[in-house]
């Protein structure tokens, strides 16, 4: 993948980061391509066609520019992913007056799940790309500040935040994976999915090796309520943090 030489590289100095370039003064009116336009177009493509569809060539076609034009603004796929993550993550907000650590973390967690479900391509993003953008750093900083206000040490604060973040991402990734699996097979509901998988399940249950799972199948009433399941799990995680750290 060709990489455009950024300003500062000719003299041997360190090139400005993607975010530093974004914060510089606005381009001249005649400039047809900006990082904001690139990010918006890439998000639209990913939302409509999937993350794998976001290529420089596809992006150039959508923007109506030459295929090499985008390379003057982004160094490659990591830059492009970061722009996309940062753009959609601007939607994550908590009211300024909210300071309680649990309320702050819970609010962000609920929003993050909804954000990932709305933009399922996020589930495939590398963790460093997801975290190292201005919008995501602002979200993390707000949560860290709420936890630190409880008088915790720095390591405990970060470990607690990462625990909640891991739960949110893992849960959302599982939900997205199931939804995509159902869509590939043309199953439109949990009942249709269970019906299609019934032969396998019947055999497994007939072995008698999984009595606890069989009780779940017979007695559970929220098999398809992913939102309830997420909230229940999230509150268990937050309860655990509160108990462990005494906050």
Image: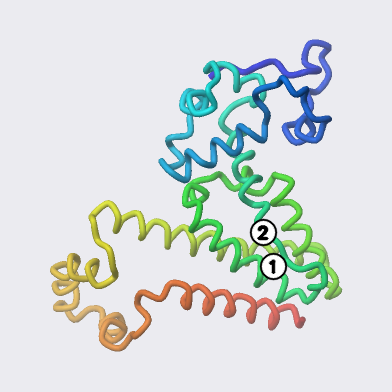
Picture residue at 79% right of the left edge, 73% below the top: 98
Q: Which residue is mark 1?
A: 160
In percent of width and height, residue 141 lies at 78, 58
For numbered disc 1, what is the local secondary structure? helix
* Count of all numbered marks drawn on residues in the image: 2
Q: Quadrant of residue 154?
A: bottom right
For numbered disc 2, what is the local secondary structure? loop
Q: Which residue is mark 2?
A: 92
Q: Quadrant of residue 220?
A: bottom left
* Residue found farthest to the front: 29
Q: Observer-nearest residue: 176 or 150?
A: 176
In percent of width and height, residue 194 lies at 23, 70
Picture residue at 54% right of the left edge, 59% below the top: 169
In the figure, is residue 109 to the left or right of 189? right
Picture residue at 59% right of the left edge, 27% below the top: 76
Where, quadrant-wise, is the C terminus in this rendering? bottom right
**Please, which colouring scheme is shown?**
rainbow
In the figure, is residue 94 to the left or right of 2? right
In percent of width and height, residue 228 lies at 47, 78
**Within 10 Å of the Cα at label 1, are there few (<14), some (14-19), or many (20+) other Cα atoms?**
many
Is residue 14 placed above or below 202 in the rendered structure?
above
Q: Quadrant of residue 30?
A: top right
Q: Observer-nearest residue: 58 or 33?
A: 33
Give the Cα separation between the discs numbered 1 and 2. 19 Å
- Badge nearest the viewer, 1 or 2: 2
Residues at discs 1 and 2 in contact (Cβ within 8 Å): no
Picture residue at 77% right of the left edge, 25% below the top: 27
């Amino acid at each position: 993948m060709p990489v455009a030489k950024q300003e500062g590289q000719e003299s041997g100095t360190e090139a400005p980061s993607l975010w530093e370039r974004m914060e510089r003064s606005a381009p001249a009116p005649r400039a047809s391509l900006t990082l904001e336009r690139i990010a918006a177009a890439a998000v639209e493509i990913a939302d409509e066609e999937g993350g794998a569809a976001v290529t420089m060539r596809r992006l150039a076609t959508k923007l109506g520019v030459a295929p090499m034009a985008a390379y003057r603004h982004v160094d490659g796929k990591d830059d492009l992913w970061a722009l996309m993550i940062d753009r959609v993550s601007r939607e994550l907000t908590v009211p300024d007056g909210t300071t309680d650590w649990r309320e702050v973390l819970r609010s962000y967690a609920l929003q993050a799940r909804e954000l990932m479900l709305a933009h399922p391509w996020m589930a495939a993003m590398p963790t460093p790309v997801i975290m190292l953008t201005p919008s995501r750093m602002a979200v993390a900083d707000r949560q860290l500040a709420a936890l630190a206000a409880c008088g915790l040490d720095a390591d405990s604060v970060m470990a607690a935040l990462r625990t909640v973040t891991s739960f949110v991402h893992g849960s959302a990734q599982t939900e997205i994976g199931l939804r995509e699996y159902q869509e590939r097979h043309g199953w439109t509901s949990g009942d249709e999915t269970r019906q299609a998988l019934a032969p396998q399940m019947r055999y497994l249950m007939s072995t008698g090796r999984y009595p606890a799972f069989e009780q779940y199948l017979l007695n559970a009433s929220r098999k398809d309520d992913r939102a309830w399941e997420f909230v229940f799990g999230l509150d268990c995680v937050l309860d655990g943090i509160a108990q462990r750290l005494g906050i």
